Image (cartoon, grey):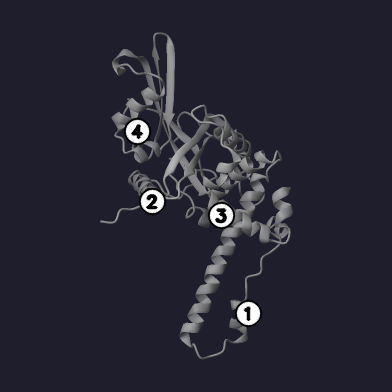
């Protein structure tokens, strides 16, 4: 029996959970145009790589623009190949007409300066959902509501603030992932500054691991999770596996303990709800029986997740470098 890869299985489970709850698995936070995309992971990679060179990375806005254009370019290239193969299949012995000939020529790559001026927000909406693994936030937010300002050109809100986590994993030659750093915040962050800050904090300041050296960069994968839809739980089990993350806190002998797991952790580990809560209590630093603690509190939340491998980031980066002023853009 052939089993699905773990990442694929987890994504399917999360999408089914969202559909079960009547949510759309589009990867979009209701009420805004913001969504988790691989472009944001590329920005984390750019930030980490730039830190080794002691320089500032390319801006998040530029990365997102270039990522959108790269996605458009790949779709156009695929359509061009399909049209060419269909034309040949129809009559292999007939020379192409001039109109067809022009279609089969190499797609012309525009300059970055042109890319910066004419992106379409509708393209972002249609493309990004196929390139990231996401669980969708519900429209009801009872504890924390992310703040946002008016949209900028292109219809994309640039001042949205969200709690977020950045995760670095190392990936073996056989595809096995090992956690290398994961740090985030429940305090709403402006997206560009939050990603920049926690990409580095997760890489260098997670006390469970030594700082990530530059030599490990090619073996890394990056995941980010934007958090929202915080709701207090009526009890420790008032949440849904594969949909909610869980944040707990409790008191023992005057000291408050706390810990959290992101929405995909319990599913990845194959835990039940009870096992997840017990593991969280251990993570918080408590080894005694749960009955001996007081003021136990639990908050459930949802998250938009996107992931990218080093190879995917490099593919995008090489495409940018192939543009007329791509090298200048990446260094600006």
Q: CA distance from mark 4 to mark 1?
A: 56 Å
- Residue 18 location (% of width, % of height): 37, 45
- Residue behind mark 3: 124
Q: Seen in the image, is 267 located left or right of residue 152?
A: left
N-term-proximal mark, 2 vs 4: 2
Q: Residue at x 55, y 34 (%)?
A: 202
- Residue 76 location (% of width, % of height): 56, 67
Residue 64 or 323: which is nearer the viewer? 323
Task: Give the label, 3 or 1, closer to the camera.
Answer: 1
Q: Residues within 10 Å of mark 4 (few under 14, many from 20)?
A: many
- Residue 224 location (% of width, % of height): 51, 41
- Residue behind mark 4: 239
Secondary structure beneath label 4: loop
Residue 294 or 278: which is nearer the viewer? 278
- Residue behind mark 2: 8
Q: CA distance from mark 2 to mark 3?
A: 22 Å
Q: Residue at x 49, y 87 (%)?
A: 92
Task: Give the label, 2 or 4, closer to the camera.
Answer: 2
Q: Could you say which disc has been placed on residue 102 in the image?
A: 1
Q: CA distance from mark 2 to mark 4?
A: 23 Å
Q: Residue at x 38, y 48 (%)?
A: 15
Residue with the most extreme bottom position: 93
């Amino acid at each position: 029996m052939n089993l699905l890869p773990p990442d694929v299985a987890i994504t399917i489970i999360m999408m089914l959970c969202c559909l079960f709850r009547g949510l759309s698995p589009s990867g979009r936070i209701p009420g805004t145009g913001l969504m988790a995309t691989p472009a944001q992971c590329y920005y984390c990679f750019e930030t980490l790589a730039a830190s080794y060179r002691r320089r500032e990375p390319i801006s998040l806005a530029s990365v997102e623009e270039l990522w959108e254009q790269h996605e458009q370019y790949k779709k156009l290239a695929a359509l061009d190949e399909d049209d060419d193969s269909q034309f040949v299949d129809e009559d292999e012995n007939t020379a192409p007409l001039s109109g067809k000939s022009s279609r089969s020529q190499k797609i012309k790559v525009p300059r970055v300066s042109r890319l910066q001026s004419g992106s379409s927000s509708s393209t972002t909406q249609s493309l990004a959902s196929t390139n990231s693994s996401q669980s969708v936030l519900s429209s009801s937010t009872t504890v924390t509501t992310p703040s946002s300002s008016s949209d900028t050109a292109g219809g994309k809100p640039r001042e949205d603030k969200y709690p977020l986590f950045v995760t670095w994993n190392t990936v073996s030659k056989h595809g096995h992932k090992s956690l290398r750093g994961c740090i985030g915040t429940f305090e709403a962050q402006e997206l560009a500054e939050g990603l920049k800050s926690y990409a580095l904090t997760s890489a260098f300041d997670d006390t469970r691991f030594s700082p990530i050296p530059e030599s490990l960069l090619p073996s890394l994968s990056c995941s980010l999770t934007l958090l929202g839809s915080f709701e207090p739980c009526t009890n420790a089990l008032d949440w849904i596996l594969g949909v909610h993350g869980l944040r707990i806190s409790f008191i023992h002998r005057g000291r408050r303990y706390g810990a959290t797991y992101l929405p995909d952790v319990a599913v990845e580990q194959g835990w039940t709800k009870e096992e997840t809560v017990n593991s969280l209590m251990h993570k918080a630093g408590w080894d005694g029986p749960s009955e001996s603690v007081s003021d136990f509190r639990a908050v459930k939340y949802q998250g938009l997740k996107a992931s990218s491998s080093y190879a995917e980031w490099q593919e995008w980066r090489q495409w940018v470098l192939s543009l007329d002023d791509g090298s200048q853009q990446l260094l600006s």
